[in-house]
């Protein structure tokens, strides 16, 4: 009968209970929704960087990334590529010839990373064609077409079909100057990358560098993010002379940001739950103080202190367990809806692009987070019931019965 | 008759270290099974304090309250709660029913605390509420009952645990004449027919008139103890 009494007790003051339930639901909703926003932004940022820039895995000759030296390359990569094609979760791969250099026009110049790519393989791997704002993906010029980012185009005052001179060292250390024709301009969500990276045809760049069958980098895109470590380890075992890195090793900051974001989510939730718990303690304390005589009577007629404690605890838990699922359900619906249609923050687009984030945010949340919320709510419910319940059992029946 | 309550040299002093108030002084009293006793006296004479001490709701400053060979003054709080549950029925001046439970549930609640089987509970609830004239109001909540009816539910609740005696603190104080008479009729009948021992604290003349023993308290001491024939 204790659960029945506790259940009915919480509806004695319907308005107060409704306000508390609403406060709990709103608190839980805001905690979960804010977390889903943070996770959504993070996921988009991850996806953007992994799927449009670095890929899940990169393979280089050891030390190449230290100073992008032309001669630190992968020779005869066919065997390696054959092995990559056997990877079960492989989505796409792209062999690249890479060089750091200067891009010059008549009026200006800028440091760039020159990626020599096979257009089809590269597009399958980083999907750049969807970010083309002008022109085509390395088509439209018989010789030396180049694809540049909008940020670079603006910086160098370049337009489609204009010429650009790239200077870079060849395999002998001599500076090569080559003229390229702008055939396409792209704009991704990362304006910093747009101002730095240019794409040319792999064979043309290899010829200019004096390379034959060598490449500098293979970018590999997998079906799932979390397969990267295993695939990297397998390939590394098979090709110990190469340097195989997963996205976590390529960009440790990205993984760190993910971990920090997860911890921030939990911290936010804990703060909200703590705030809610104080509200609930206050409400339950009021409920106990309003029922001093009744609680005194219960103890007078033989209800043990343990049972009184459990009754108050149940009342508190019922409030939490009604409000929290309501908040979780509203959060689930909002995340499902906005996860599909997104929250358009284009008016702040520049800031997002500078941070490499798409201005339309799609909230998303792991199912596990909901389970953790349930556990934390249960803990908060039990903890917040302790003080009011202790207050209730500290009453002396003879005194309590006389209270008005 | 069997003695069920023995009070020996019972004293209760409030604020013993500051301004001592001697609510109960050196009381010796024996209550026998089947008695219908009223403890009377003016306000502040110690009636309620004495009843609280008898019910184990308060601690004495000195003395003994022996119920069924057990000195309840020596029991700890948890044992006392269980002792009250098994041995004493309470009726309070302000009824003190659980407002969220129906009449039936209020009575059944005590037996649930005693872990009585469901069948026994259901039968006893029905028979008790019928005995107090509320057989047709089993599902009514306290707010749907008059004061007299609530107090009758309280009597049924007090009897539900099959106590050795019932302590009733000013049970008629909040009732109109008709309700008070009905309540007293019921308690008198339960006393005569079932031998239930009742001990009232009251200054209601209607209760005094019905009582077969009247203990008069003045300033915490027994001034007279009269058994009516």
Image: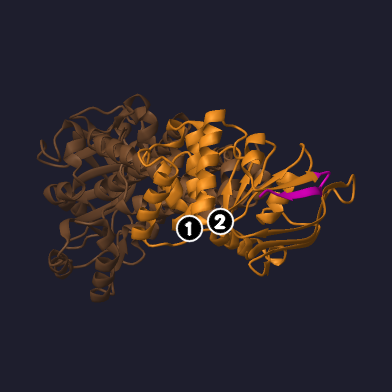
Chain colours: A brown, B orange
The answer to the question of whether label 1 and label 2 lie on touching residues, with beta carbons closer than 8 A, is yes
Location of mark 2 (residue):
A302
> On the rendered structure, is A375 left or right of A139?
right
Q: Residue at x 37, y 59 (%)?
A: B120
Percent of width and height locating residue A298: 55, 49
Camera-side residue of A107 and A357: A357
Residue at disc 1, secondary structure: helix
Residue range in magenta is B218-229
Eyeballing the image, is A109 above or below B161? Answer: above
- From the image, tell me which residue sits under label 1: B113
> Rounded to the nearest whole Å, what is the CA distance between mark 1 and mark 2?
7 Å
Q: Is residue B224 above or below residue A189?
A: below
Q: What is the quadrant of residue A337 in the picture?
A: top left
**Residue A78 seen in the current view:** yes
Task: Pick out the residue farthest to the front.
Answer: B229
Q: Is residue B21 left or right of residue B53?
A: right
**A328 and A308: which is toward the camera:** A308
Q: Residue at x 79, y 48 (%)?
A: B224
Prevalent SS, magenta region:
strand
| Crowd tier of the residue under label 1, counting other residues whose Cα lies within 10 Å: few below 14, some 14–19, many 20 or above | some
| Residue A180 position within the rendered picture, expressed as x and y whole percent measured from the top left | 21, 39
Q: Is B223 included in the stretch rendered in magenta?
A: yes
- Crowding around mark 2 (Cα neighbors within 10 Å: few <14, some 14 to 19, many 20+) is many
Provide the chain ID for the residue under circle 1.
Answer: B
Q: Chain of mark 2?
A: A
Considering the image in quadrants, where does the C terminus of chain A appear?
top right
């Amino acid at each position: 009968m204790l659960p029945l009494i506790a259940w009915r007790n919480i509806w004695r003051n319907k308005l107060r209970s409704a306000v508390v339930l609403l406060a709990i639901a709103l608190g839980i909703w805001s905690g979960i929704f804010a977390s889903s926003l943070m996770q959504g932004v993070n996921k988009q940022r991850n996806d953007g960087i992994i799927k449009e820039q670095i890929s899940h895995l990169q393979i280089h000759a050891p030390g190449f990334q230290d100073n992008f030296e032309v001669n630190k390359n992968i020779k005869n990569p066919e065997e390696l590529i054959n092995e990559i094609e056997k990877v079960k979760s492989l989505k796409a791969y792209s062999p690249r010839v890479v060089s750091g250099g200067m891009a010059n026009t008549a009026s200006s110049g800028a440091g760039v990373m020159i990626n020599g790519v096979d257009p089809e393989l590269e597009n399958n791997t980083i999907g750049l064609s969807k970010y083309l704002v002008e022109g085509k993906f390395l088509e439209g010029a018989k010789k030396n077409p180049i694809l540049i980012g909008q940020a670079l185009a603006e910086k160098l005052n370049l337009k489609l079909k204009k010429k650009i001179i790239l200077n870079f060292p060849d395999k002998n250390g001599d500076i090569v100057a080559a003229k390229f024709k702008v055939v396409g301009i792209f704009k991704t969500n990362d304006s910093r990358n747009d101002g730095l990276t240019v794409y040319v045809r792999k064979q043309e760049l290899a010829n200019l560098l004096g390379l034959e069958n060598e490449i500098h980098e293979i970018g590999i895109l997998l079906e799932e993010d979390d397969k990267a470590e295993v695939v990297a380890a397998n390939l590394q075992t098979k090709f110990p002379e190469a340097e195989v890195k997963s996205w976590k090793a390529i960009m440790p900051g990205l993984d760190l940001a993910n971990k920090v974001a997860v911890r921030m989510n939990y911290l936010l939730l804990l703060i909200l739950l703590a705030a809610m718990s104080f509200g609930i303690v206050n409400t339950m304390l009021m409920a106990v103080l309003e029922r001093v005589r009744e609680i005194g009577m219960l103890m007078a007629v033989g209800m043990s202190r343990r049972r009184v404690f459990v009754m108050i605890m149940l009342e508190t838990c019922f409030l939490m367990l009604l409000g929290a699922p309501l908040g979780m359900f509203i959060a689930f619906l909002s995340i499902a809806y906005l996860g599909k249609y997104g929250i358009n923050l284009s008016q702040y687009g520049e800031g997002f692009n500078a941070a490499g984030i798409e201005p339309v945010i799609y909230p998303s949340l792991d199912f596990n987070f909901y389970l953790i919320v349930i556990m934390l709510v249960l803990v908060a419910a039990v903890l917040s019931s302790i003080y009011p319940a202790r207050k209730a059992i500290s009453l002396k029946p003879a005194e309590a019965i006389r209270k008005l | 008759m069997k003695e069920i309550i023995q009070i020996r040299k019972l004293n209760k002093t409030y604020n013993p270290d500051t301004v001592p108030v001697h609510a109960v002084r050196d009381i010796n009293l024996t209550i026998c099974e089947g008695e219908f006793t009223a403890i009377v006296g003016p306000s502040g004479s110690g009636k309620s304090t004495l009843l609280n001490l008898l019910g184990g709701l308060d601690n004495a400053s000195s003395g003994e309250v022996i119920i069924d060979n057990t000195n309840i003054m020596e029991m700890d709080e948890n044992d006392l709660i269980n002792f009250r549950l098994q041995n004493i029925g309470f009726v309070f001046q302000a009824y003190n029913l659980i407002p969220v439970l129906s009449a039936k549930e209020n009575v059944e609640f005590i037996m649930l605390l005693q872990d009585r089987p469901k069948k026994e509970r259901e039968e006893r609830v029905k028979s008790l509420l019928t005995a107090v004239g509320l057989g047709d109001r089993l599902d009514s909540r306290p707010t749907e009952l008059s004061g007299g009816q609530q107090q009758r539910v309280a009597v049924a609740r007090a009897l539900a645990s099959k106590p050795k005696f019932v302590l009733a603190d000013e049970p008629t104080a909040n009732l109109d004449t008709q309700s008070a008479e009905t309540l007293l009729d019921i308690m008198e009948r339960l006393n005569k027919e079932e031998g239930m021992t009742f001990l009232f604290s009251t200054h209601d003349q209607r209760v005094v008139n019905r009582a077969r023993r009247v203990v008069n308290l003045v300033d915490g001491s027994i001034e007279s103890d009269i058994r009516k024939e």
